[in-house]
Every structure is written in C-alpha cells, then in structure tokens.
Image (cartoon, rainbow, N blue to C red):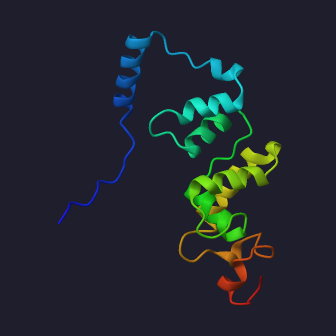
Amino acid sequence: MSAAPEAWSPPEPARVRGILQRLARRYGPLDLAWMERSTTPRVAAYLSSLPGVGPKTVACVLAFSLRRPALPVDTHVHRAAVRLGLVPPRTAAGPAHALIERAVPARSRIRMHVGLIRLGRDVCRPGRPRCEDCALAGVCPTAPSVLGGAGA
C-alpha cells in the first residue's frame, strides 16, 4: 500500500527569501519593474513559465500588484461562478478562469473577483449554500433547488 501524498503547503518566507537571494547571486539584482512597462500577455506568459505558477497566481499578480484587469479564480470564486451559471458544472478551474474573465468587462474584473470571493466565502458556501440570505437568489439557477421553491 502506498503512502498518501502529502498536502501542499506554501514555502516558509525564509525559504522564499533564500531562493530569491540565490537567484540574485546567480543573475544579478532582481528587478521586475519591467512588468509595469510590459504588455499584459508578455507578463502573463513570463509568470506562467515559472514552476508552480498557474492562472490564479498570474491573475493575482496582474490584478493586485500591477492593477491590470484580471480576475483571479480561487475555490470560492469557482464555486459561486458554477452555481450562478457563469460556467458549466464540472468545469475545471483553468478553463473556468478563461470563461469568467471573457464574460466580465475589463473595468469590472477586480471588483467582480472581490464580490465573488466574498459571496463564495460567506453565502455560497460548500455543501448547503445560504441562498435564503443571498441577494442574487432571484437570478441564480441553483437557488430554487436549494430553497425548494420557498423563495427564489
């Protein structure tokens, strides 16, 4: 019988600093200021080329570090988006990220991310969502099945 895989946990800050120090010794001063001047596709391609960096991390850097119109899709956003019918059921996070970002106007992506993440954490929770407390229950395709016809 094989051992269960260990759960992933983020590296300790000291370990990240050590990696960055090794990179600086090898390649010289670390300067990502070029991202401010570069195009979003170039920055996204560069970030995606790094080991362990996926669409969510790329979108987080673009949205929150560079203030670019990106919509990070984490587990909360993904769950709320599926239940709201923004993406088909059983859509994986990567394809869901692209579908949601295409559906949301650029000027609204960061606000939409923040709204969906709050919705997914507080109301549209795993298991039984709290549709009775949701302002979107009237337009949500999932609410009627949860509420049992009691008010969507």
- Locate residue 115 relative to residue 11 in the image: left or right: right
Dividing the picture into quarters, in which one does residue 129 lie?
bottom right
- Locate residue 45 relative to residue 68 in the image: left or right: left
Q: Looking at the picture, how far across and down is residue 24, in whole percent?
A: 42, 14
Q: How many marks?
A: 0
Q: Looking at the picture, how far across and down is residue 42, in whole percent?
A: 66, 28
Residue depicted at x 44% and y 36%: 51
Residue 66 visible: no
Q: Nearer the viewer, residue 36 or 151?
A: 36
Q: Nearer the viewer, residue 8 or 12?
A: 8
- Locate residue 143 relative to residue 12 in the image: left or right: right
Dividing the picture into quarters, in which one does residue 32 lie?
top right
Residue 150 visible: yes
Dividing the picture into quarters, in which one does residue 5 lie?
bottom left
Q: Quadrant of the C terminus?
A: bottom right
Q: Quadrant of the N terminus?
A: bottom left
Residue depicted at x 75% and y 46%: 109
Q: Looking at the picture, how far across and down is residue 98, in whole percent?
A: 68, 51
Q: Nearer the viewer, residue 33 or 132?
A: 33
Residue depicted at x 53% and y 75%: 127
Q: Looking at the picture, how far across and down is residue 103, in whole percent?
A: 78, 54
Residue depicted at x 73% and y 64%: 86
- Locate residue 88 relative to residue 139 in the image: left or right: left
Image vertical order of residue 146 relative to residue 7, above or below: below
